[in-house]
Amino acid sequence: MSPLFRHCCAFGSHHPHPLIWRSIFQTSGREQKQIRSWRAQCSANQDQASIEKSNAPKNLAIPDDSLLDARILYCTSPALGHNKEAHPESNKRVPAIVDALEKLELSPKHRGSQVLEIQNFNPASLDDVARVHSRSYITGLEKAMRRASDEGLIFIEGTGPTYATETTFQESLLSAGAGITLVDSVVAASKLGPNPPLGFALVRPPGHHAVPQGPMGFCVFGNIAVAARYAQHQHGLKRVMIIDFDVHHGNGTSDAFYVDPDIFFLSTHQLGSYPGTGKINEVGQGDGEGTTLNLPLPGGAGDYAMRYAFDEVIAPSAHRFKPDIILVSAGYDAHVLDPLAGLQFTTGTFYMLAFSIKQLAKELCGGRCVFFLEGGYNLQSLSSSVADTFRAFLDETSLAAQFDDPAILFEEPTRKIKDAIEKAKGIHSL
């Protein structure tokens, strides 16, 4: 076993240790795949006693010059042990993205200091997760791992398809920890210069459906919600804006912050899709009234709808709220090729969103912005769209023309789209 492999197995240690930065000088493509595979095995087989329970700040030990040069920071948590055969939320999703980044020369191997993968990061602590989820849910899921170990796979959501294997608890903590690590890194970089790198947590299981009391809709822990609370608690970033462009409403994130005036949750999603929440008149409650904005889009909405929505709803909301950091639930299941919904976004739509949100962050909050992978179940459209998101982060031209086939698109329902956007503007006085 090489020293790098041994170091990767130090996940969850109670002792601070430097993160590993993967660059062109460290590994070949073949070795990278081995490291990713080994890292996932190490994290999946952690002794539960090793999970960090402290609230102490993470010791990142990241060189300042690396942060100054980087344009993108990302973490991968493929959760290879969390898998059910023939389930759309499979363990093939993150590896497909990583392979696309390599093929399209967007990986650290090809980009050197511009694109950095943070490795050997810590799982989220139980206290981190408990800022969003109930202690009873966290401890109950941990105990359920014994049953999952005996049975191989169990269902943990009473009425839906959310499953668990014996590694789900540890791997879900690791995915939440990836988001926390990226918040730490992006905040540190923002103190060094005016153009910090953007973060992307390429993680699963996804998180935006997980409600405070339990799992839902393929989601176990609310990765983005945990990171939002961490940004407030650890870094004093009081005002957090969460933009969710997954095709499904992020009901778990919404529930967590529905009465919170300091977290603005904005969701675009397909009208009438799972889980049936996210009505346009749901705007928050109590002190949080006005800091939840839902924009349900009619079936068939696509690039026109999102460009219009960004200009008329998303950007004005952000300018009015004036966030200290922007977090993004980046679901790629609104793509026209995705099997689980009926919108018709393209790779170019996601490029536009990434580029525009990056500009918003630069204008409003010192460039502090972290994306979190949510849905996306067609491996081809998922991986090409994430790759084009990286290109947007790098200010490089979109490759959407190589992936998108205009012939499969049909005319968007523009009147319904305009009506929905105008109604949202009216409700929120935009």
Image: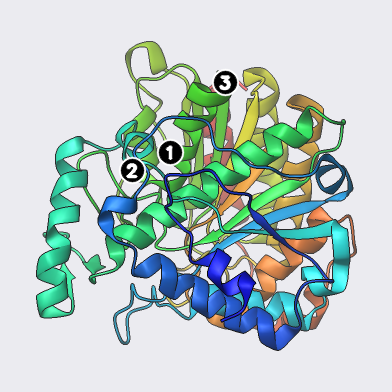
Residue at (19% x, 64% y) in the render: 160
Work out which residue is located at the far top of the displayed protein and give it: 287
Mark 2 nearby-residue class (10 Å; few <14, some 14–19, many ≥20) = many
Measure how far apart labels 3 and 1 are at the Cα level: 13 Å
Three-letter code, disc 3:
Arg
Which residue is label 1 attached to?
A: 225
In this rendering, is residue 323 above or below 188? Answer: above
Q: Which mark is residue 239?
A: 3
- Viewer can see residue 159: no
Tell me which residue sits at (83%, 71%) in the image.
24
Q: Amino acid at mark 1?
A: Ala
Mark 1 or mark 2: which comes first in sequence? 1
Q: Earlier in the sequence, mark 3 or mark 1?
A: 1
* Nearest to the observer: residue 357 or residue 183: 183
Identity of the residue drawn at 13% across and 60% down: 144
Mark nearest the camera among 1 and 2 is: 1
Residues at marks 3 and 2, CA–CA distance in whole angstroms? 19 Å
Q: Secondary structure at mark 2?
A: helix
Q: Judging from the image, what secondary structure is the residue with disc 3 in? A: loop
Cα distance in 3D space between marks 1 and 2: 8 Å
Q: Secondary structure at mark 1?
A: helix
Q: Which residue is mark 2?
A: 252
**Could you tell me if the residues under marks 3 and 1 are in contact, i.e. CB atoms within 8 Å?**
no
Q: Earlier in the sequence, mark 3 or mark 2?
A: 3
Q: Residues within 10 Å of mark 3 (few under 14, many from 20)?
A: some
- Residue type of the residue flagged with mark 2: Gly
Q: Quadrant of the C terminus?
A: top right
Left or right, 350 with reference to 338:
right
Viewer-nearest residue: 289 or 20: 20
Q: Position of residue 151 (x, y in %)?
A: 11, 78
